[in-house]
Image: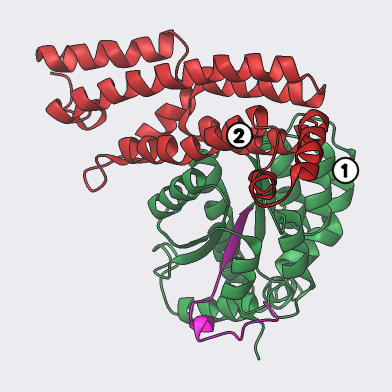
Chain colours: A red, B green
């Protein structure tokens, strides 16, 4: 058993991430790809994931909550009131693009799965089910929940890696005595 | 122009002659990885490097074809020095899907010898069958694990070494038994296309869940076909 208190804390933190279902075995797969030459591989992948998926979250948000295109705004400013009526017409009529939403979520789910983000992946699956049944309300609820899990995971992993950097990752620790 | 894949295989044959076959092949396997996901590209790249492969990772089928020199719009620009030994591609990609890329590779006389492996997050039997029928070497369900990559690289390099051993063994014995050039045929014939012609029956009738047994079914039928005098 490791005597170092920080290492112990790190181990406990790590275990609880698995126990509470935030992470699954794919995270362990990534840990096994670390070595002396690549000691921060997992952190690099996770950092990349959060940066890349933020873009997808934004796209999904846009597709869910923005109901008319920016170009129509431009028309509004440049042309006459006739166009305003057209704009309102579009605004009320524009349907959810479930296919587009599902496409974004497919990508998001893929990356989440690749890093072992278990809860986030589950929320993605739920969201996609609502897309497939064209349930706009369901999509919006699922998206709120997903963003919560995503934010929680981000916080926990940031804390984990911050601690890991202080001690060196567990996986490259010396063998137990 | 020589058939790329075959040249690689044949070139290795010439090099291996005279070497101790128990030593590992010094030539690295060059893999072209295709995936639109940044995260997945980073992971697959690492997985392949760990299995001692040279990796080129691209983000689309179009770029993969450009790299191979198959894209009509661009000329092959000196990349044919870097022979590709294996293509591993995601299935769902915007623009050209992995399936479409597979078809283009298999339709090309220059590159159809290159084994193509498909990766997909969706474990759909119909999709898997379609890919295998089109000539895919294997199908990996995402997320990709090290064991998946190791398995593929292992049987790629092992099949070849076994083929070599067999060929040299047969030559040494001066075709004593009924090993009538079967070993030779394994080199001159194109493994992937032989594979696709013989793979349809075992794969499409299989209803087992997609894990190692189903995937290995295809390889076994390949081995049986090529090494007819094995057992």
Q: Secondary structure at mark 1?
A: helix
Q: Position of residue B39 (x, y in %)?
A: 47, 43
Q: Nearer the viewer, residue B28 or A114?
A: A114
Identify the residue at the far left of this view: A4
Q: Nearer the viewer, residue B16 or A163?
A: A163
Going 27% across and 10% down the picture, which residue do you hit?
A12
Going 82% across and 34% down the picture, which residue do you hit?
A89
Res A4 → quadrant = top left
Within-10-Å neighbours for mark 2: few <14, some 14–19, many 20+: few
Could you tell me which quadrant the N terminus of chain A lies in?
top left
Measured Cα–Cα span from mark 2 to mark 1: 42 Å
Q: Which chain hosts label 1? A: B
Q: Which residue is mark 2?
A: A62
Q: Which chain hosts label 2? A: A
Res A62 → quadrant = top right
Going 42% across and 20% down the picture, which residue do you hit?
A151
Q: Is residue B21 above or below residue A2?
A: below
Region rendered in magenta: B71-89
């Amino acid at each position: 058993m490791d005597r170092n208190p920080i290492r112990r804390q790190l181990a406990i933190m790590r275990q609880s991430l698995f126990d509470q279902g935030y992470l699954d075995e794919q995270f362990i797969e990534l840990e096994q790809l670390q070595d002396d030459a690549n000691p921060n591989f997992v952190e690099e992948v996770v950092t990349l994931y959060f940066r890349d998926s933020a873009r997808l979250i934004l796209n999904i948000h846009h597709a869910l909550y923005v109901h008319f295109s920016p170009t129509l705004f431009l028309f509004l400013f440049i042309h006459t009131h006739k166009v305003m009526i057209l704009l309102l017409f579009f605004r009320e009529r524009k349907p959810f693009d479930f296919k587009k939403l599902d496409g974004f979520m497919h990508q998001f789910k893929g990356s989440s799965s690749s890093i072992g983000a278990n809860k986030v992946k589950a929320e993605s699956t739920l969201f996609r089910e609502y897309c497939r049944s064209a349930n706009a309300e369901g999509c919006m609820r699922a998206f709120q929940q997903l963003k919560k899990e995503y934010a929680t995971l981000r916080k926990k992993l940031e804390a984990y890696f911050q601690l890991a950097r202080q001690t060196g990752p567990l996986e490259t620790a010396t063998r137990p005595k | 122009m020589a058939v790329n894949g075959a040249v690689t295989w044949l070139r290795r044959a010439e090099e291996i002659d005279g070497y101790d076959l128990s030593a590992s092949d010094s030539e690295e396997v060059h893999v072209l990885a295709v995936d639109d996901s940044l995260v997945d590209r980073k992971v697959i790249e690492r997985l392949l490097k760990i299995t001692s492969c040279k990796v080129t990772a691209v983000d689309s089928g179009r770029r993969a074809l450009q790299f191979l020199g198959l894209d009509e719009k661009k000329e092959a620009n000196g990349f044919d020095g870097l022979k590709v030994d294996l293509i591993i591609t995601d299935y769902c990609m915007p623009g050209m899907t992995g399936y479409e890329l597979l078809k283009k590779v298999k339709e090309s006389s220059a590159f159809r010898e290159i084994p193509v492996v498909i990766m997909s997050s969706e474990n759909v039997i119909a999709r898997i069958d379609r890919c295998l029928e089109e000539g895919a070497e294997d199908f990996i369900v995402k997320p990709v694990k090290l064991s998946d990559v190791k398995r593929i690289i292992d049987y790629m390099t092992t099949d070849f070494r076994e083929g070599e051993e067999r060929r040299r063994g047969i030559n040494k014995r001066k075709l004593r038994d009924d090993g009538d050039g079967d070993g030779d045929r394994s080199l001159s014939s194109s493994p992937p296309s032989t594979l696709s012609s013989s793979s349809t029956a075992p794969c499409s009738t299989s209803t087992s869940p997609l894990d190692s047994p189903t995937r290995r079914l295809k390889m076994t039928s390949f081995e049986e076909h090529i090494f007819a005098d094995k057992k």
